[in-house]
Image (cartoon, coloured by chain):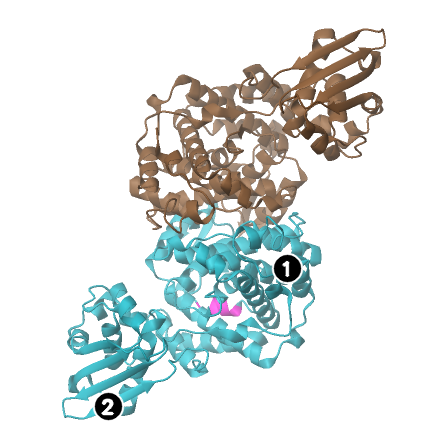
Chain colours: A brown, B cyan
Amino acid sequence: MEVTRKLARFIVEHRYDDIPENVRHEAARAFLNWVGCAVGGSRHETVERALAALAEFSGPAQATVLGRGDRLDIMQAALMNGITSHTFDFDDTHLKTVIHPSGPVASAILAFAESQPVKGEDFLHALILGVEVECRIGNAVYPAHYDVGWHITGTAGVFGAAAAAGRLLGLNEQQMVWALGIAATQSSGLRELFGTMCKPLHIGNAAKNGLLAALLAKENFTSSNQGIEAKRGFGHVLSTEFKPAEITERLGETWEIALNTYKPFACGIVNHPAIDGCIQLRNEHKLEAEDIESISLKVHPLVLELTGKKTPQAGLEGKFSVYHSAAVAIVHGAAGEAQYSDACVRDPKVIALRDRVSASVDRQMREDQVRVAIRMKDGRTLDKFVERAIGSVDRPMSDADLEAKFRSLTDGILSKAETGNLIRLCWDIGRLEDAAEVARASVPTAEAAAGKSWVTTEDTEHTEKS
Amino acid sequence: MEVTRKLARFIVEHRYDDIPENVRHEAARAFLNWVGCAVGGSRHETVERALAALAEFSGPAQATVLGRGDRLDIMQAALMNGITSHTFDFDDTHLKTVIHPSGPVASAILAFAESQPVKGEDFLHALILGVEVECRIGNAVYPAHYDVGWHITGTAGVFGAAAAAGRLLGLNEQQMVWALGIAATQSSGLRELFGTMCKPLHIGNAAKNGLLAALLAKENFTSSNQGIEAKRGFGHVLSTEFKPAEITERLGETWEIALNTYKPFACGIVNHPAIDGCIQLRNEHKLEAEDIESISLKVHPLVLELTGKKTPQAGLEGKFSVYHSAAVAIVHGAAGEAQYSDACVRDPKVIALRDRVSASVDRQMREDQVRVAIRMKDGRTLDKFVERAIGSVDRPMSDADLEAKFRSLTDGILSKAETGNLIRLCWDIGRLEDAAEVARASVPTAEAAAGKSWVTTEDTEHTEKS
């Protein structure tokens, strides 16, 4: 079966009108969430170091590093936005494959959209197609490929970025076949690098290398006609199992982006039911930490295995503490990046409540369940059984939840008005005349005016203008 | 065992004085051969298409595309020189692993040397260390890794480029560990792409991505401490067999570059004995094609299996014809790229002789052997048994042979004087005050003066100046 060619034909020929409205809306949700993550991650040390290493080699100042004044050529901007948007590991998840689908695709095409006009409709279409391609390729090799040790968002993401960028570049079928082959031969990223700055680099590389594949194919740079399915192609070399039908069957009838999920909380997913339950009780009863005698949690065994840290000392350690997570859920009513800062983990008020949280394993609990019991100082007992944690496929975050998450991510970087405007543009992405408006609106006004850009001042030297 | 750290420590701490003179000389031979291949390939369609796709995104005009007036940022120049130097598949070969070792390493560090001064001695040292790293990593996974379907020059080459560039950047041990980890997680390139423009792209990507790894590590961009040997690191994920001792044992005592070989002829290695024998007979007897009645070859079975095309129609097909190869060996006394052009394959004089060449299998012949029998029109019979073809480890090309090959590659691009000067600089590489002199001297004077460069003319646009 001609897997690569069939997929290429689909990408090239598909019509936006044939995408159902609910799928378009899910794509806008994914995009909104991705932009929030990118802006939120834009000041992280990981990004600062990558910029310090690479920005001096940037070409023309074409495209925005979301949330920052820096402007880079589109290849470097795609790389940087891939890094920023995954730095908090807070972007969207295709649970079937654990792919974070928006990062590689959106990073590539938003940068591209700053180099030549792209209508919002075409942008959203390319995003949906790119996600479809990477998730279907992921479906074809998951879980064997992941078990071998590949970071699937990197390895599959490069196909999504190539497909989406290639669609916007107007590749013909043969060129799209080549673009997918060039993507296949750049597919990379090892799980060994989890927990290091290279994890988000994988998403940046997927975006940049996918864009590279599309640009080369546009100039008829040749590759294989069977980059995905050949004996020595992606499917067989990078996986011990390959199910090509997952790529080609019912193309255009089902949409992988419809299965997308969003993390409500900035920590590992096993903590989410406990946080969810505590926030619900807090809001229902207008709880104050000082009125609470104790909190006891009945949890799935994995919770204590992965997040059993009693006394975290640094922000990152807080992510591995269900005790800290429950405490901030009560104290702040949230569990975003701010709740996993060093300052928050050391906040006496949080510590005082954390020390009154206990957790025990209940083997009846599913992974997305928890039972929270709060004993109040006044003698009352409050109970909450969370049957499905918020953010799961069965109980998705609402649009309002996503907006609240967005605001918590951009807080301290953008003003309230800037954030509001950016949220509006993200929801409107499919109707914008110029998709790049989102990128421009992500930059704080003061920094945009200062025009921090890495531009050529003479033939052999780049200078940072501030 | 700490494979990555032990290797990193070696790269960082090794002293040039501890490299034997014969190893240094072999490195100069490898470099000379590599520069010739890069200049020779610089006008190929593969390179034109890559430049058309990417040069507009180049940063400052820091570094040379060898043999051309184009100047690009060092990352893009590394990419392009990796492409040009492998386009003819005529670069050096480490036969134990079939790695083409110079391409990834030299492409990265020569570009780097144009951005800041690098002494020739340090350059040659970095080249030797980079080749050592990629070939040892190759030894640790070959042949299983190659059999899986990986293009080993791409997958191992990225480590060599990272090591060599990292050495020149002065990375400390921890940074070098990170650089190797960043290299590991970018390792890519599939054999499925052989026969397409992506094969040389793999070498370019290895050079560029290795340089990227070193630049990121210099800014303390973190990666794994066990990128090579971890359960989910390079060795286990990209190969079904991993022999770590091949990487760490006798480091600094043996030198992989000493095993380097060079192709004398621009075609698959199975043709080489026949070409060698014909050229020897031609030179010994001052043969003219029109005096020859017939040529009969006794060859290894693989020769007819791989290169049995009787009537090639295009230049590339000529490489798969032992008949054409024997004919040009007599007519031109050479088998370089010029002898595999469309024009040469269609030359009536070549065709007339080609039609009088016959070949039959002799199962006694080794792969690097041939028996040539030429019957002259005057009745004489001339015989030659080639016991070991020129270019094999046991009968290496001489320095003079390498110079002749270099001249045939640069012919039509550089003048005789320019070629002579460039050859001299390559031999002198270890003694140059500034290694980048080689890059500058590779450009035809007229083009260098015209200064064809992709420079920023305004913030958002690049223009090609001619």
Residue A277, percent from left and from top = 68, 16
Residue holding disc 1: B169
Comparing marks 1 and 2, which lies closer to the viewer? 2
| Residue nearer the viewer, A121 or B454 | A121
Magenta span: predominant SS is: helix
Q: Which quadrant of the figure contains the N terminus of chain A?
A: top left
Q: Are marks 1 and 2 in contact (CB under 8 Å)?
A: no
Per the rendered image, the range of residues in magenta is B437-442
Local crowd size for mark 1, using a 10 Å CA cut-off: few (<14), some (14–19), many (≥20): some
Image position of A377 (left or right of B53):
right
* Residue B64 is inside the magenta segment: no
Q: Is residue A368 above or below residue B160?
A: above
Image position of B101 (left or right of B356):
right
- Report if residue A150 is visible in the image: no
Q: Residue at x 72, y 34 (%)?
A: A316
| Residue nearer the viewer, B251 or B417 | B251
| Residue nearer the viewer, A141 or A9 | A141
Q: Residue at x 65, y 23 (%)?
A: A272
Q: Earlier in the sequence, mark 1 or mark 2?
A: 1
- Report if residue B246 is visible in the image: yes
Disc 2 residue type (three-letter)? Leu
Q: Quadrant of residue B373?
A: bottom left
Residue A348, percent from left and from top = 85, 24
Q: Is residue A355 above or below residue B139?
A: above
